Image (spheres, coloured by chain):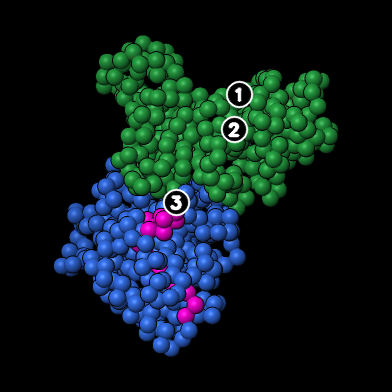
Chain colours: A green, B blue
Amino acid sequence: MNYVGIDIGGTNIKAGLIDESGKVHKTLGTLTIVDDLDGLISSLSNLLKEFQASANIDAVGIGIPGLRNTRTHRIETSPNIPCVHNLNLEELLSKPLKLPVITENDANAGAYGEWVCGAGRNLQFMAYITIGTGLGGGLILNGALYRGACGFAGELGHVNIDPMGRQCACGARGCLETRVSAHGIVETAQEYMRNTKSTLHSIPHLTAEIIYERALAGDAAAAAAFQDTGISLGIACADLINLLNLEMIVVGGGVMASGKLLLGSAIAEVQRRAFAPAARICPIVQSQLWPNAGMIGAAMLARDRQ
Amino acid sequence: MNYVGIDIGGTNIKAGLIDESGKVHKTLGTLTIVDDLDGLISSLSNLLKEFQASANIDAVGIGIPGLRNTRTHRIETSPNIPCVHNLNLEELLSKPLKLPVITENDANAGAYGEWVCGAGRNLQFMAYITIGTGLGGGLILNGALYRGACGFAGELGHVNIDPMGRQCACGARGCLETRVSAHGIVETAQEYMRNTKSTLHSIPHLTAEIIYERALAGDAAAAAAFQDTGISLGIACADLINLLNLEMIVVGGGVMASGKLLLGSAIAEVQRRAFAPAARICPIVQSQLWPNAGMIGAAMLARDRQ
């Protein structure tokens, strides 16, 4: 059996031809058209047709940022891809393609991927955190993807880390995503740079990647930004452990290329905050499937018709 | 069928003779012996014998504060009742009594009670928050009491509300319980009193109850303390809604005698912070079973052998 897994991001679409064991046989990519539905649909159709030319496809799974309503199968809101707002993308694609199509929140798809064939295999209780431009989360509880009352669960990027903290794009203040994300790391580094000499001052456009490199090279402000970000991540992990009594937290996403720097500080904070008997059984580890967790997870959701 | 539900608190034990529909037919109470196991066991046995004298008991459910391990059935730690530390209370009581005995974390028992025969009947996704001396939580997810990997789940009192906040008895800083609890309200009121004239200054031993009365009577510091506490409660509720996509949050406990003052401020904060589509389907309501939620829930857990 062959499946296509598609991970629609705010910038790029990644698609893979994936077998029933989760192995990726071929990948294709294209830019995401965020504001023209016909354009988006036709680029998805083109990707699928290209896979169909070389293999018999049994089902398609699509991970997409936003709140997907499990009752209506519609994407209720997707701030980064506004053209899918209030849309049943499954219906729209499956009819012309004559294929079963399922959609899922992208971080939920990543959680499913890590659980089915990544770091969380054989566990019953797992959280997946993906740190990129923003921060996404997905939960595996009692051996199943946890979706909540209508599919909106797992929005870990928008749990609070600091009630009076930074303004978040969602409208609230101090969401985890405002600190633990590529953008959050840049803002934190800028705060640390203010009253210190730092090699970061010479860089016109700061990115999390550059800050990471400078942190490794010994820049104090850069190192402090990563340390600080890790502490915020650790507080969120401790909350998840105290609230949900998990067996593992898997952390992935683009920022996790700088994984060890971030995870070390996060794990130390978890030790300070979470209940010891609960923290003891919950390792915090790096994604095994990154950068393909969402794509593989979407394909596995299509396989399992979840 | 008759069940006995027992709610062991840090100060008092409440026990009830409860039928299979959750109706309470008789209640008994005694002081909790926290540091002498033999004394505690014999007071529990005496309560049960008194019920047995008037009715045929089928099973006993006990709610007790602390982390109960579902794998070992032991109470791993119970800071307020140290004599049960690392103890299998079920085994210890069921043999001499010749009755099935189940134990459960007290807030989990309260959640189960509100779900089976209180405010959350027929729901699949619900959180229960009990605000008293401390703050306890319990979760109903996918139509079942959610316990996590080994029974420690639902420790909402120890999710973070302020990373640099007040020192918590658990060792961490800024746990929700440090602000949203009887003790937390007193501390918050004392902060608001510092630079203002307040009728609270004349009171030698402040309690949450007195602060509530003075808030109703127009004392500004007292009102601000409740407002502030409600905001913290609202932040925690918004986090639960964004993370777990619930259908209802039920709030009970001693402090909820002052329910409307606290809930009004909490609900307003949820509107400011939670995702609108998720908040819209999740009313935040007062407990229907308080002060008997834990006792009734424990009996219903015994009924259902959960």
Task: Give residue B150's mark.
Answer: 3
Q: Residue at x 78, y 37 (%)?
A: A100
**The image quarter in which residue A10 lies:** top right
Tell me the kind of residue under disc 1.
Answer: Thr
Residue at the far bottom in the pictured view: B54
Tell me the kind of residue under disc 3.
Answer: Cys
Assess disc 3: are there few (<14), some (14-19) or many (≥20) residues with their C-alpha within 10 Å of its C-alpha: some
- Residue B159's x, y, as percent? 38, 48
CA distance for labels 2 and 1: 26 Å
Q: Which residues are magenta?
A: B57-74
Q: Quadrant of the N terminus of chain A?
A: top right
Give the number of the mark in front: 2 or 1. Answer: 2
**The image quarter in which residue B183 lies:** bottom left
Tell me the kind of residue under disc 2.
Answer: Cys
CA distance for labels 3 and 2: 24 Å
Task: Give residue A117's mark.
Answer: 2
**The image quarter in which residue A218 lies:** top left
CA distance for labels 1 and 3: 41 Å
Residue matched to label 1 = A11
